[in-house]
Amino acid sequence: MTKITASMVAELRSKTGAGMMDCKKALSETAGDFEKAIDLLRKKGLSAAAKKSGRTAAEGLVIVAGSGAAGAVVEVNAETDFVAKNDAFVNFATKIAELVVGEKPENMEALLALPFPGTGRSVAEEQVHQISTIGENINIRRFERQEANNGIIESYVHGAGKIGVMLALQSDKADNASVQAVARQLAMHIAAAAPQYLRREDVPAEVIDKEKEFMRAKALESGKPEKILDKIISGQIDKYFGEICLLEQAFVVDPDLKINALLEKTAKEVGADINLIDYVRYQLGEGIEKKGCDFATEVAEMTKG
C-alpha cells in the first residue's frame, strides 16, 4: 500500500485548492495516484469549492439561537442576497447557531471541528459541501455565545437577518413580564442605535484622547479662548459618551429617558436590581470590503462569447 506523505498532500492541495483532509483522503482512495486523486476531488466538487472560497462573500445572514439563560449570534456569509434566502443556506446557518449554543466552542477552529448534525461530516466539511451544492462561497465569519446566570438572554433580528442583537440581563426577577419586556426593547434599541460600548469605562483611553484632540482643534478653529477649552471639552466628551455608550444613550422609545435610567425605573417597579451584563450587535457584512465586480457581473462575464 502506498504511503501517503505530508508532501504529497501539500502538493495535491496546491494543485486543487481542496482541504488538507480531503486531499489526504483522495490520495488514500487512489493509492497515491495524483491524476486519479485530482479527478476524484473534482467529482466530489471539492476542487471547485476551494476555488469559490476565494471570492468575496459579504451577503448572507445574521442568525440568533437559544433562549432562557444561553444564546448565540452567528454571521454566515454568501456572495449574493439570493442565496441568503435559499432554504439550504438558512438551514445551514441556523444549525451553526444552534451548535454554538449547545456545544460552546471556544473559537472558530473548535466550531469547524464539531460534527454537523445528521450528515456524518464535520462543520468544515459541511461548509465545503454547501459551497459545492449551492455554487457560491459560503463563510462562517464570526460568532459569540452568552450566558446569564440568574438572568435571561434576549435577542432580536432586524431586516431579515441584516442585523442581529443579543444581550445578557441579570435580575432576581428575570421571569417578570416587565423585565422581559424591557430586555426586548433594549435589544431593539441596540439594533437601532448601534452603541459601540456598554459603559464609558469600556472606552479605550486612546479613543477618548483622540476625540478630545479633535474637539480641541475644532474649538480653537472656531475662535474659542484657550482658557475655557477644558470646560468646553468636558461638556462635549459627556455628550460623546451619550452617543457611543449604551447605558448613557437616550432610549429610542422615549428620548427623554436614558438607558441606565430606564433600568433603574424598571428595577424600582419590580422590586429587584436589573443589571445589563453585556451585549453584542452584528451587522451583516460590516468591515468586509466588497470588490467592484459583483457575483452577478462575474457570471455574466463568464457566459459571454
Image (cartoon, grey):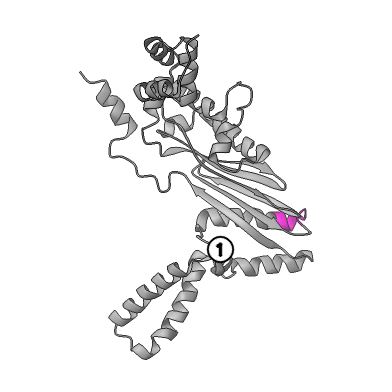
- Asked if residue 100 is positioned above or below residue 127 in the image, the reply reads below
- Does dot 1 land on a helix, a strand or a loop? helix
Identify residue type, mark 1: Leu
Q: Quadrant of residue 93?
A: top right
- Residue at the left extreme, as displayed: 305
Is residue 135 or residue 82 the one in the foreground? 135
The image position of residue 70, as x and y in percent, is 69, 46
Residue at figure coordinates x 46%, y 71% from the top left: 240
- Residue at the bottom extreme, as displayed: 227
Is residue 254 or residue 223 the one in the foreground? 223
Number of numbered discs visible in the structure rendering = 1
Residue at figure coordinates x 65%, y 41% from the top left: 104
Q: Which residues are magenta?
A: 174-180
The image position of residue 194, as x and y in percent, is 50, 57
Magenta run includes residue 178: yes
**Neighbourhood count class around disc 1 (C-alpha, 10 Å): few under 14, some 14–19, many 20 upward:** many
Q: Which residue is mark 1?
A: 246
The image position of residue 29, as x and y in percent, is 49, 11
The image position of residue 68, as x and y in percent, is 72, 46
Residue at figure coordinates x 51%, y 69% from the top left: 242
